[in-house]
């Protein structure tokens, strides 16, 4: 399997997974760059996966289905036009072409019914996590609660360390700028930031990340670390009582950063 990031809009990635002949796409907000990539690589589209209902993740579904007549999988707890296979937590998807099996994780917070897709029997592992987890960041709380987001991030952080993280926006450098303030003393984060700056200077994606890296550099996965707690306390003017309160304060801080 090969996985290609298809740039869309200002900073979206539509992920295309292929075996050299057949492909699936994740969160096709725009059909045009998907069609161009399929033609360029001589691929036949076999399926569409959707993580949540926002238009920059769903806007290309209708055109792709009209052209390719493929199944569309998406979250059962959200109403998304074109989804014919509604999936919920623990469901498994077994696609014949490309041959891949995925397990569904419900990860609400960014939206009420957001899901992620975890590769099964793939080494190293992978997860298509939409807008729930970003490299060095997480999604804004549009519909969910801090408790839901905390639970969702914990589920993703519990995946095997070498799991590749395919999120859907190139937000890494801006997230790292906030991470430097939210946890000032983190040498591994600073090294990763320097690497990402080099990648972006060359026009290359900073993704995928890995779960191991995110546990090390992402302040939203480090709300029990003293450095994050102290930074949040200094910013908010009061010390968070627990990791959830720290996460809520951190997310609110990031919203205005």
Image (spheres, rainbow, N blue to C red):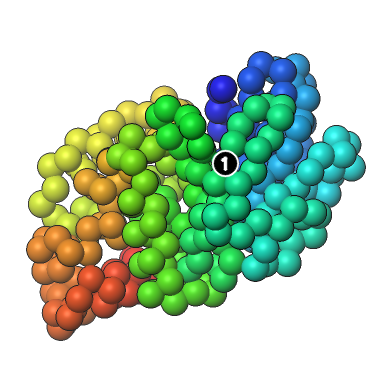
Q: Quadrant of residue 202?
A: top left
Q: Is residue 235 above or below residue 106?
A: below
Please report the residue visible at 72 percent of the width from the left and 27 percent of the height from the top: 97
Q: Position of residue 101 (x, y in %)?
A: 59, 36
Please tell me whether residue 136 is drawn above or below residue 52 in the rendered image.
above
Residue sitting at x 85%, y 35%: 68
Tell me, yes or no, if residue 89 can be seen here.
Answer: yes
Residue 122 x, y percent position in the rendering: 47, 30
Q: Is residue 139 left or right of residue 220?
A: right
Q: Nearer the viewer, residue 252 or 93?
A: 93
Residue 30, located in which quarter of the rendered image? top right
Query: Mark 1 falls on what kind of element?
Result: strand
- Which residue is rendered at x = 56% and y = 51% of the image? 104
Give the quarter of the figure containing the N terminus.
top right
How many numbered callouts?
Answer: 1
Question: Which quadrant holds the C terminus?
Answer: bottom left
Task: Quadrant for residue 245, please give it.
Answer: bottom left
Identify which residue, 52 or 158, lies in the foreground: 158
Q: With 10 as the anchor, is 37 left or right in this view? A: right
Q: Nearer the viewer, residue 156 or 5?
A: 156
* Spot occupied by residue 121 in the image (x, y as percentages of width and height): 49, 32
Q: Which residue is mark 1?
A: 102
- Image position of 169 with respect to 108: above or below: above
Structural crowding at the residue carrying mark 1, measured as other residues with C-alpha within 10 Å and reported as few (<14), some (14–19) or many (≥20): many
Residue sitting at x 10%, y 63%: 226
Taking the view exactly as shown, the residue that stands out farthest to the bottom is 238
Residue 237, how many percent across, how many down? Answer: 16, 82
Q: Is residue 188 left or right of residue 149?
A: left
Q: Is residue 235 visible?
A: no
């Amino acid at each position: 399997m090969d996985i290609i990031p298809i740039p869309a809009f200002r900073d979206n990635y539509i992920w295309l997974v292929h075996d050299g002949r057949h492909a699936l796409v994740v969160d096709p907000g725009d059909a045009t760059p998907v069609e161009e990539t399929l033609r360029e690589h001589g691929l036949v589209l076999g399926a569409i996966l959707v993580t949540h209902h926002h238009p920059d993740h769903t806007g290309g579904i209708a055109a792709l289905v009209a052209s390719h007549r493929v199944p569309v999988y998406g979250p059962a707890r959200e109403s998304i036009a074109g989804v014919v296979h509604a999936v919920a937590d623990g469901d498994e998807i077994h696609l014949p072409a490309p041959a891949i099996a995925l397990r569904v994780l419900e990860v609400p917070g960014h939206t009420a019914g957001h899901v992620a897709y975890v590769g099964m029997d793939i080494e190293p592992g992978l997860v298509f996590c939409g807008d729930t987890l970003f490299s060095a960041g997480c999604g804004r709380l549009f519909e969910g609660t801090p408790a839901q987001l905390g639970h969702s991030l914990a589920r993703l952080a519990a995946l095997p360390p070498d799991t590749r993280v395919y999120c859907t926006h190139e937000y890494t450098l801006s997230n790292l700028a906030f991470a430097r303030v939210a946890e000032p003393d983190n040498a591994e984060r600073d090294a990763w930031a320097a690497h990402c700056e080099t990648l972006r200077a060359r026009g290359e994606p900073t993704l995928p990340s890995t779960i191991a890296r995110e546990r090390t550099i992402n302040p939203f996965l480090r709300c029990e670390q003293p450095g994050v707690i102290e930074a949040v306390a200094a910013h908010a003017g009061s010390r968070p009582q627990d990791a959830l309160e720290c996460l809520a304060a951190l997310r609110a801080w990031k919203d205005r950063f």
